[in-house]
Amino acid sequence: MLIPSIDLMEGKIVQLVGGEKKALEFTHLEYWIQRFSSYPLVQVIDLDAALRKGNNRGLVDKIVRRLPCQVGGGIHSIKGAKSLLESGAQSVILGSSLVRNGQPDTNFAEDLSAALGSSHLVFAVDSRAGKVAVDGWRGKTTLSPIQMIQKLEPWCGAFLYTHIETEGTMQGIPIETVRELRSITQRRIFVAGGIRSHEEVAELDRMGLDAVVGMAIYASQLEV
């Protein structure tokens, strides 16, 4: 399944390359809400919140009232996650807050699941050079994506894997890497990072993976 992504920064929809360089930005949010209205799921990421540079909560609330969404970016507490669910998000995405002292924080994951239900939880696994990145992708760990998934699997409904090196490049996501992840968990897996065509989306779908697409849509390489 193709899942359009709306990344928010400073009140605008943006697309970054590798999570750093801004390549595109749009101010006409209503246009994209209309474009994505037929999709069963849309991903919304508050990049400012993820980078601890403020937030775009007003825009997030507007979007989740109109579209079925999974929402991430700067969620560090049960209270924060619950607030987004109460605003209308179908599920919340957590990543950095699930790593403590360089290891998966299974206690926090268990508490989240008990409070909110695992079906509402998507755990993000952001990978750079084969290791999990945190804190808006600026921080490094020694954890592999496989280790992260295996430790946290009992407490979520899905994982979101982002291949940072190809994020925003439209060069394609590494198929063998995501194939291996598919083989180690029964949880739903969303994958992101350079996905560029409907053919690639279809290939991922055949593997049982959902494709999160941003740059290829906004750059008009992949029509929606």
Image (tube, rainbow, N blue to C red):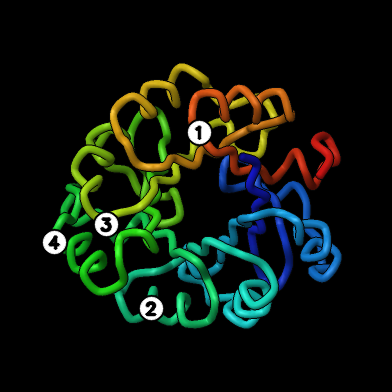
Mark 3 or mark 1, which is nearer the start of the sequence?
3
Q: Amino acid at mark 1?
A: Leu
Q: Secondary structure at mark 2?
A: helix
Please state which of the two labelled residues, at mark 1 or mark 4, is closer to the viewer: 1
Q: Nearer the viewer, residue 222 or 9?
A: 222
Residue visible at 46% across and 70% down in the picture: 52
Residue tagged 4:
107
Q: Which residue is mark 3?
A: 98
Q: Residues within 10 Å of mark 2 (few under 14, many from 20)?
A: some
Look at the numbered disc 1 and give the secondary structure of its residue. loop
Residue 26 x, y percent position in the rendering: 81, 61
Q: Earlier in the sequence, mark 2 or mark 4?
A: 2
Q: Which residue is mark 2?
A: 82
Residue at mark 1 to residue at mark 4: CA–CA distance = 27 Å
Q: What secondary structure is found at the residue carrying circle 4?
A: helix
Pointer 2 or 3: first along the chain: 2
Distance of mark 2 from mark 3, alpha carbons?
Answer: 16 Å
Residue type marked 4: Asn
How far is mark 1 from mark 3, CA to CA? Answer: 22 Å
Of mark 1 and mark 4, the one earlier in the sequence is: 4
Closer to the eye: label 3 or 4: 4
Q: Nearer the viewer, residue 148 or 14?
A: 148
Q: Quadrant of residue 119?
A: bottom left
Q: Secondary structure at mark 3?
A: helix
Q: Mark 3 or 4 closer to N-term? A: 3
Left or right relative to 161: residue 111? left
The numbered mark at residue 209 is 1
Q: Is residue 207 left or right of residue 3?
A: left
Looking at the image, residue 65 lies above or below residue 14: below
